[in-house]
Image (spheres, rainbow, N blue to C red):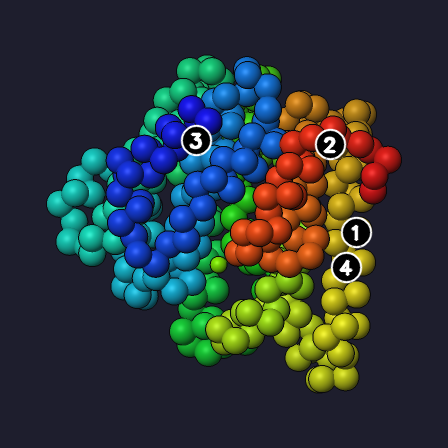
Amino acid sequence: MMALFHLDSWVKENKLDQLEFARQKQAYCYFSAAATLFSPEMSEARMSWAKNSILTTVVDDFFDFGGSREELESLISLVEKWDGTWKEESCSEQVKIIFSALFNTINEHGIRASALQQRSITHHLVEIWLTLMKSMMKEAEWTLNKEVPSLDEYMLNGYVSFALGPIILPALYFVGPQLPEYVVNHPEYQNLLKLVSTCGRLLNDIQGFQREGKEGKLNSVSLRILRSHGSASEEEVKKEMQRAIDGSRTELLRLVLQQDGSVVPRPCKDLFWKMCRILHVFYMKTDGFTSPKEMLGAVNSVIHEPLKVSHI
Ligand SMILES: [Mg+2]
């Protein structure tokens, strides 16, 4: 509970509670972190996970509806520049609040991670965020320009915009093992993220189809129906997506358990798998992230059930 209190004051210090468009999800973000990284020596990884979850929620809402095109562009250009002169830039109060929170948090985590890893990490943390924002910008442009991407284009971008990058990847630096640059650039590392993110994106789209349809947003359910020229039903499309989710999940578990030729340390790989389990619990019945009632029971079950390989 002390940690949750700390998180609340961090939100206030960074004025994130003043952003009217943003969902306030501190408790869920913290519990998802606590469920995943429960041991005492994981406290830094847990805080990184929780703070970055809150920031990705804010940034997601900003790109989805909170910010104008100009604001989104100016936020991205501040992240690209990444220097202390940002306070002099002319940009909206919302952009200033979001950038300042990112700037402080990334630098703080960067300093700690660099000390633990004995090499400079901050640039990688910035790059993770930039990649996310560019994928969210692409989606915003599709909506603003009323463009319809192909399903492949959508998915290639959509697994990134699901925003697990800034939640999982920075936390890996605090788990314990050294993660040299060649590991971070290795296809295995990229694949772990892609597989868990694909599960998340598809689960989110299955559950969010009705809501997002009302908001005029395309997702992989509507794109699959479109691609079939209307011959596939919503139900058939969702079954097809469920098979894709099961495939990604099985492949993810295979990578996590694989020993021969694996370069990502097992304790780090476990984070991807735990995130995958959390996603399945969150999205089991509804879009758990936006319907609070379902979540509390789910969080409890994640905290109390140990990792069981036989469950897939
Ligand atoms: Mg979004």
Callout 3 secondary element: helix
Callout 1 secondary element: helix
Question: In the drawing, does residue 172 fall left or right of residue 126?
Answer: right
Q: Does the Cβ of the disc 4 residue fall within 8 Å of ligand 1?
A: no
Q: Determine whether label 1 and label 4 are within 8 Å by CB.
A: yes
Q: Residue drawn 74% across and 41% down? A: 252
Question: In the drawing, does residue 59 fall left or right of residue 147?
Answer: left
Q: Earlier in the sequence, mark 3 or mark 4?
A: 3
Task: Using the rendered image of the protein, determine whether residue 62 is visible from the camera's viewpoint.
Answer: yes
**Which is more foreground, mark 3 or mark 4?**
3
Q: Residue drawn 83% across and 39% down? A: 311
**In front of the other: 232 or 114:** 232
From what the image shows, is residue 113 above or below residue 55?
Answer: above
From what the image shows, is residue 116 above or below residue 110?
Answer: above
Callout 4 secondary element: helix
Instruction: Calculate the distance from the C-alpha at mark 2 to the C-alpha at mark 1.
Output: 20 Å
* Amino acid found under the numbered disc labelled 1: Asp
Q: Which residue is mark 3?
A: 4
**Which is more foreground, mark 2 or mark 1?**
2
* Amino acid found under the numbered disc labelled 2: Glu
Instruction: Calculate the distance from the C-alpha at mark 2 to the C-alpha at mark 4.
Output: 23 Å
Marker count (numbered):
4
Instruction: Calculate the distance from the C-alpha at mark 1 to the C-alpha at mark 4.
Output: 6 Å
* Amino acid found under the numbered disc labelled 3: Leu
State the mark number for residue 305: 2
Callout 2 crowding tier (Cα within 10 Å): few <14, some 14–19, many ≥20 = few
Instruction: Calculate the distance from the C-alpha at mark 3 to the C-alpha at mark 2.
Output: 22 Å
Coordinates of residue 26 in the picture (x, y in percent): 44, 41
Q: Residue drawn 77% across and 79% down? A: 232
